[in-house]
Image (cartoon, rainbow, N blue to C red):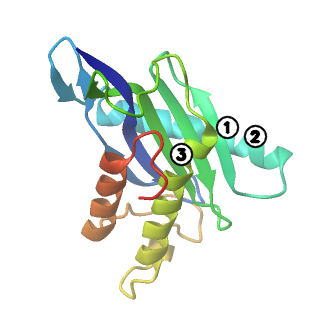
Amino acid sequence: MSAAIPSVACLGVIGRNNNPLHISIFPSYDPLANAFTPIRNPLQFSLLLSSTIDVFDLRSKNSTASGDYGLLHAIDDRLAAYGFETNTGVRMVCIVDMRGRRVEAGGSGAVGVGAGLRDAELKPVFRAMQSAYVRLLQNPFYDPDEHAPLGGKGGKRITSKKFGDAMKRIGEAWTPGVTTL
């Protein structure tokens, strides 16, 4: 018999002008098909990431410090959005599927479906995402201003393969209880 534990369904980076910079989608376990498939399509995840912007804005008005916002909102009985904002206004979002990864019965670290997650369990994800973003900014060929233009509208998405690979590694490696990624 197998059980399901939380997994990352989507990682997103939102620019300081509320423009999407990067979206990585990860497949979740579907017990009916006994296969891994994305729980939502890319457009739906893009809309879910956009819905977090209002929560970030609301919380930033109530707090003078940027940083860890933890649970932004529960999307449904299966998905929840968690967020972190850097001091430069770049927002990082992790959408967690509470039943996204299959483990065999007796496996360690299993979290019950309705148990939820503590905010601290996602800190390694945001720490790793921020480190990957800082490494991207250190690339002399990356121009952050073309991703967040001075006019405040639009901007290009991050197309760095190295950054995309880092996001993929983070999303695939995280499970509840992991302390470093």
The residue shown at (46%, 61%) is: 128
Classed neighbour count for the residue bearing mark 3: other residues with Cα under 10 Å, few (<14), some (14–19), many (≥20): many
Q: Amino acid at mark 2?
A: Leu
Q: Are marks 3 and 2 in contact (CB under 8 Å)?
A: no
Q: Secondary structure at mark 2?
A: helix
Front position among marks 3 and 2: 3
> Quick one: which residue is furthest to the bottom in this view?
140
- Above or below: residue 39 compared with residue 86: above
* Residue 123 versus residue 1 in the image, above or below: below
- Circle on res. 156: none
Q: Residue 171: horizontal and vertical position, in percent?
A: 35, 48
Q: Nearer the viewer, residue 33 or 150?
A: 33
Residue beneath disc 1: 55
Q: Can residue 79 be seen in the rendering of this structure?
A: yes
Query: Label 2 belongs to which residue?
Result: 58
Q: Nearer the viewer, mark 3 or mark 1?
A: 3
> Separation of disc 3 and disc 1 at Cα?
18 Å
Quadrant holding the N terminus: top left
The percent coordinates of residue 167 (x first, y second) are 35, 56
Q: CA distance from mark 3 to mark 2?
A: 21 Å
Residue to which mark 3 is pinned: 122
Upstream in sequence: badge 3 or badge 2: 2
Does 100 sit left or right of 21 as displayed?
left
How packed is label 2: few (under 14 Cα within 10 Å), some, or many (20 or more)?
A: few
N-terminal of the pair, mark 3 or mark 1, is 1
- Residue at far top of view: 32
Q: Amino acid at mark 1?
A: Val
Element under disc 3: helix
- Which residue occupies 43% across, 79% down? 143
Query: Residue 3's spot in the image, x, y percent?
Result: 31, 19
Q: CA distance from mark 2 to mark 1?
A: 5 Å
